[in-house]
Image: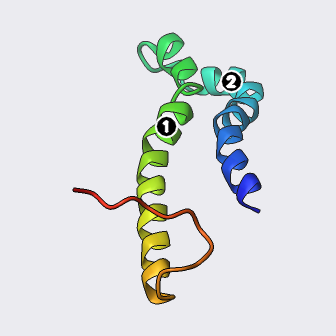
Amino acid sequence: MTGIALLLPVTLSVMAIVLLTPSLPQILREFSGVAGHDYWVPMLLTVPAPCIALLSLVAGMLGGVMLAARRIRRGGDDGAMPVPAHG
């Protein structure tokens, strides 16, 4: 289960591009009245990747906090690798 949880986020940025690319001509037509639409609309394809990169850091930190909280509630041994003490 952990392997799947680690591999799924990697596919998110690719899936976003795959889903948005077929609708790109229609989006270009829709925003044809907006100045610079030839530049801004294709940028839409690149937005999901940096968002995933930035938000995955937050998700990783939250996951680490949740794992530490679970370890404390269970008395220390949940079968996970030991976390080295700081200091």
What residue is shown at x 74% (from left), y 53% (from top)? 3
Left or right of 13, for residue 46: left
From this view, report whether residue 55 is shown above or below residue 79.
above
**Residue sitting nearer the eye, 31 or 86:** 86
Which residue is under mark 1?
Answer: 53
Residue 39 is situated, as x and y percent measured from the top left of the image, at 49, 12
From this view, report whether residue 19 is shown above or below residue 56.
above
User: Which mark, by number, is residue 14?
Assistant: none
Residue 86 is situated, as x and y percent measured from the top left of the image, at 27, 57
CB of mark 2 within 8 Å of CB of mark 1?
no
Q: How many marks?
A: 2
Mark 2 or 1: the one toward you: 1
The kind of residue on which mark 1 rests is: Ala
**Residue sitting nearer the eye, 22 or 47:** 47
Which residue is under mark 2?
Answer: 24
The kind of residue on which mark 2 rests is: Leu
What residue is shown at x 59% (from left), y 26% (from top)? 45
Q: Quadrant of residue 54?
A: top left
What residue is shown at x 49% (from left), y 37% (from top)? 53
Residue 17 is situated, as x and y percent measured from the top left of the image, at 68, 30
Q: Could you tell me which quadrant the N terminus lies in? A: bottom right
Structural distance between the alpha carbons of marks 2 and 1: 23 Å
Q: Looking at the image, is mark 2 or mark 1 earlier in the sequence?
A: 2
Left or right of 86, for residue 55: right
**Residue sitting nearer the eye, 85 or 18:** 85
Q: Residue furthest left?
A: 87
Residue 30 is situated, as x and y percent measured from the top left of the image, at 60, 27
Q: Quadrant of residue 83?
A: bottom left
Q: Element type at marker 1?
A: helix
Q: How many C-alpha atoms fall within 10 Å of the one at disc 1: few (<14), some, or many (≥20)? A: few
